[in-house]
Amino acid sequence: MDTERMGAAETIVQSIMTYTDHMFHNRCGIVSPDARFKVGVRWEYATHREKCLAHPDANVRPEKGTKRLLCAECQADVRGSGLRVVYRKTLVGKKTVETRVGVLSGNGDVLEGGRAVAQWREAGMFREVAKWMYESVANVWVLDNEFAARWASHSFSEDHKDRAVVMAAFMLVQARKGDPHTEDGKLLFRDEDFRNVGEAMVLHTKGRKEKKDGGEISPRMLLRVHELLSLPEVAEVNRRLGFGVSARRPCLGRWPKAVEKWLRFREENPKMLEGLVKSGQKGTVLELCQRSGYRPGSSKFFEILGVRQKQAKDGHRTIAIGQDIKAAASWEGMTEEQVCEAILREKVGYKRVVGLVPKAVGLTRAVMVACIEAGGVSDKEMIILMPTLEDLGLLEVQSVKERISRAVAAAEDQRATNVAARMRSQSAKEQLAEASDNAVKAAVEEVMKGMRLYVVVDISSSQEGAIEKAKAQVPKFLGAFSEDKVHVSYFNTVGRELKIPHPSAAGVAKAFSGLVASGGTDYGQGVIALESHKPSDDEDALIIFIGDEFNKPPHDLSFKDEVQRSGIRPSAFGLIVNLSPNTAGFPRGHSVRRTAAELSIPCFEIEEGSFSDPYEIPRVLRNLIASTPVSAARTVTAAERRRTLVETIMQTPLLQKPAWAA
């Protein structure tokens, strides 16, 4: 690998590994310009409603027994009237608040006051993020082909579905595909076949006991690979790199071949195909067949899927044409007792139960308990279902309590933070808070070895809202590190250490109480305030700043001298930018980034929303800490030494296809 180019590749990798927005959104939303985000826009959850042209502010209600929508003011039917008002939906506490954005036009623009303020997006791919992520991988590939392939191999086992989709898509189409090199008609050698890495990502499976979010491409993710490669912006990137020859059709590389192998393996192992049907993925499998042009080997394939084959117009189909297919499983007409017996007998998963349970029965206490006892509810689902379990009065049932305890101990992300907001029981909220802490600790346990964290908060007069943001963000760090490894300070022209009475949101809120934004700005004082907590010789230090980089005049002063005087010896800076109304219109400062450059250490800019998404917090922390370089001065053995993210990627072996596909 070209180590001289690793500096640029490393920067790109660190950027994409700490990016948090989703590439796919399963609900409608709006996209509007926002310079704070790497992609230049932000996505927000939104809805739209039809309104009366004559009375746009009047309420609209459906007429009972008809499909008409009536204006409350003039009683006119507004269905299909053409006036569709868009509302942004924001969660405030336990309530969703709707705010008018504008009127949806025919081309998808949301207009307000005669100008476009946003763009409407249906559920599906966030194109700007998709292009940015794909181009980032392409830029690394241009710098170092082999490193990109190892990065894909490393990402396969990570808990990040979007990145796995992007990596698999890129590796399936990139140009290194084992082409022969000849001389005088003789084969000299074959080039590296990195498309094998993409195939391996698609074809690897995990056993039931070892299943986690990472390590396997699901059927839905396989379809997303196709959707990503078909995106015009991504197809243009591939043409620019010479991956495809067609100017009209997108390059799919080995995607059709890999999907054919994926489907063939499941056809030859009917239990796997039946499992997909039981988990409600029949439609996804059929769509994969259609897009890849798969031709099953026998009619058994369609029997398992419960699909009757019809002859194509050109008459090319030969399997199961007109053959009677057994009707899909149905629980309609069953009693509650029969449903529970079926769940326990067939070991049906929760998602499948929801689709099969008769409407007349519904999701009752007995049905829910049967599903849990049958092992049909995963740890992640147990946490998501806590409000439902509370409504059903199951939180005090001993078997359910034990199952919840196991789920809390095994929590892999911080979705429990969102779930807790919907709970009434204080003890349940405390359990979910514990799950969140467990998720962060488990996620960063390995990479935080030999790491000490410093959080420095700017409370100068320009930092309106910074204290509130710090109250929300600091507890996330406290949950990941032991108390003696996290140190917090605040500063304006003077710095003070912040003593936190308890490593919790309540403890942090208490510590910040009584502080108001005021005074000038001197980042160096915030660092000096923590000089009594120097890292030991076998520790690395990461300093995270929360502020806007405006230093005391002139704004871009370096505070290198104060950092060196503190004795903290940071290996990297992290910067959570807080842009406040008080600095609107002023150019951003460069104090933190300039100081990092003078200290010859990296500075990772962390987007403001990175720690607001509880699903992303463990991943961002893990990647941020792993990206921090290891100090050469550390006196530790090779076994104790913390490996950086790039070192881990470079030492990752190239993913190989499973034996049955080799």
Image (cartoon, helix red, strand yellow):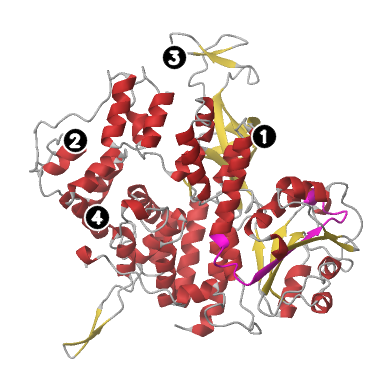
Q: Quadrant of residue 153?
A: bottom left
* Label 1 crowd (10 A; few <14 / some 14-19 / many >=20): few
Give the CA distance from mark 4 to mark 3: 44 Å
Is 384 one of the magenta-colored residues? no
User: Which disc number belongs to residue 262?
Assistant: 4
Q: Earlier in the sequence, mark 2 or mark 3?
A: 3
Give the CA distance from mark 4 to mark 2: 19 Å
Q: Mark 4–mark 3 contact, CB under 8 Å?
A: no
Q: Earlier in the sequence, mark 2 or mark 1?
A: 1
Q: Amino acid at mark 2?
A: Val
* Label 2 crowd (10 A; few <14 / some 14-19 / many >=20): some
Residue receiving disc 1: 93
Residue receiving disc 2: 307
Give the CA distance from mark 2 to mark 1: 45 Å
Q: Mark 2–mark 3 contact, CB under 8 Å?
A: no
Q: Quadrant of residue 55?
A: top right
Of the two numbered discs 2 and 3 in the rendering, the one whose residue sits closer to the viewer = 2
Of the two numbered discs 4 and 1 in the rendering, the one whose residue sits closer to the viewer = 1
Identify which residue, 460 or 618, lies in the foreground: 618
In the displayed image of the protein, which residue is found farthest to the bottom?
A: 184
Identify which residue, 190 or 329, lies in the foreground: 329
User: Which disc number belongs to residue 67?
Assistant: 3
Identify which residue, 537 or 620, lies in the foreground: 537
Left or right: 405 in relation to 226:
right
In the displayed image of the protein, which residue is found farthest to the front?
A: 398
Give the CA distance from mark 3 to mark 1: 34 Å
* Label 4 crowd (10 A; few <14 / some 14-19 / many >=20): many
Q: Earlier in the sequence, mark 4 or mark 1?
A: 1
Is 457 one of the magenta-colored residues? yes
Residue 467: image x %, image y %? 80, 50
Give the CA distance from mark 2 to mark 3: 33 Å
- State the extent of the magenta-drawn residues as a range: 443-467
